[in-house]
Amino acid sequence: MNHAVSNIALPPLDHIGLLPRLAELGATGLEVAPSRVWRDTSNPDAESYRRAVEAAGLRVVGLHSLFFDRPELGLFKGPDLRAATLDFMVHLSVLCRDLGGRTLIYGGGRRRGEVRPEDAAVECRAFLSELLPRMEGHGTKLCFEPLGPKDSDFLNTAAECLALVEEFNHPALGLQLDAKALVENAETGAATFEAVKGRLDHFHANDPGLVVPGSTGVVDHALLGQRLRDIGYDGWVSSEQRMLSDADPLADVARSLAYLKECYP
């Protein structure tokens, strides 16, 4: 498996100088939260950032934390913001392509709230029917991130996300798994992984609170790594760990990468 680090583990807006150290620590990929790089994610300089990443011996694998700086956008935000959300998603897909990445992990920003489950499903399908054709020429994949019940009330489980992927069967709609969500949704069994065999595009190795993976004891990463090996997954495993120390953020990144190499070889 290939090991990536999310840039949420690095200082916001000022981490270019740290990128070579990630490669020295054993990372080969960087997962990008756009708001961690640019104050204005509507007008990013993708070329310069990509050059810096690749000069450091890394490659961008994709984007996540898509709506962090645009919380007004997302699913179930009302008809007035639908067009703006679609346009922003297309913009992010272009950005992902221009950075050399492939996956756009859609986590937060999709609470249905008072919207009935059946109405939320209809709205999501209409949204995807309009969005996916606008993305398909980019070579990118939108992946809904399975989330625990505390983090979302729509598309929580891996099974639900897989069903949506199978329903659309579209090249711009992919599949991602999230370690802590697998635990929270009781989906760590072999059947979950067998169901996604040959379909999985990305994997987040994380713990509750986005601390150093493995540090809480809640997630059995060794088990999940074995599950991935059992289905022949050889794609990206990304450490989704937030910056925990202003003084020395790379110390925690080093611990994360060492643990990833141990559990997800």
Image (cartoon, rainbow, N blue to C red):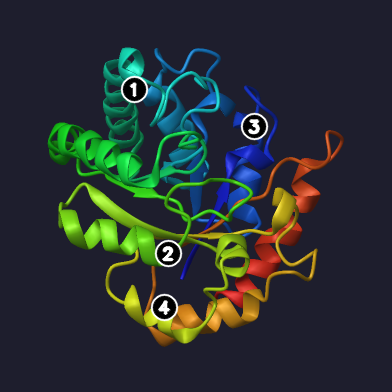
Where does label 4 land, which residue? 193
Give percent across and percent down for residue 8: 63, 38
Q: Amino acid at mark 4?
A: Phe
Where does label 1 land, which residue? 85
Give percent across and percent down for residue 203: 47, 61
Q: Earlier in the sequence, mark 3 or mark 2?
A: 3
Residue 126 horizontal side relative to residue 236, left or right: left
Q: Earlier in the sequence, mark 2 or mark 1?
A: 1
- Callout 2: helix, strand or loop? helix
Q: Residue 176: which numbered mark, if any?
A: none
The answer for how far apart the CA atoms under marks 3 and 1 are is: 33 Å
* Nearer to us: label 3 or label 4: 4
Residue 168 horizontal side relative to residue 106, left or right: left
Where does label 2 land, which residue? 158
- Callout 1: helix, strand or loop? helix
Q: Amino acid at mark 2?
A: Ala
Question: Is residue 57 visible in the rendered structure shown here?
Answer: no
Residue 118 horizontal side relative to residue 68, left or right: left
Q: Amino acid at mark 1?
A: Thr
Kindly identify the residue that appears in the image at 61 percent across and 51 percent down.
240
Q: Toward the viewer: 53 or 193?
A: 193
Q: Are marks 3 and 2 in contact (CB under 8 Å)?
A: no
Kindly identify the residue that appears in the image at 63 percent across and 54 percent down.
24
Question: Is residue 9 visible in the rendered structure shown here?
Answer: yes
Q: Amino acid at mark 3?
A: Gly
The answer for how far apart the CA atoms under marks 3 and 2 are is: 37 Å
Quadrant (top left/top right/bottom left/bottom right) for the C terminus: bottom right
Q: Are marks 3 and 4 in contact (CB under 8 Å)?
A: no
Where does label 3 land, which residue? 17
- Callout 3: helix, strand or loop? helix
Q: Quadrant of residue 259?
A: bottom right
Categorize mark 1 by other alpha carbons within 10 Å: few (<14), some (14-19), many (20+): many
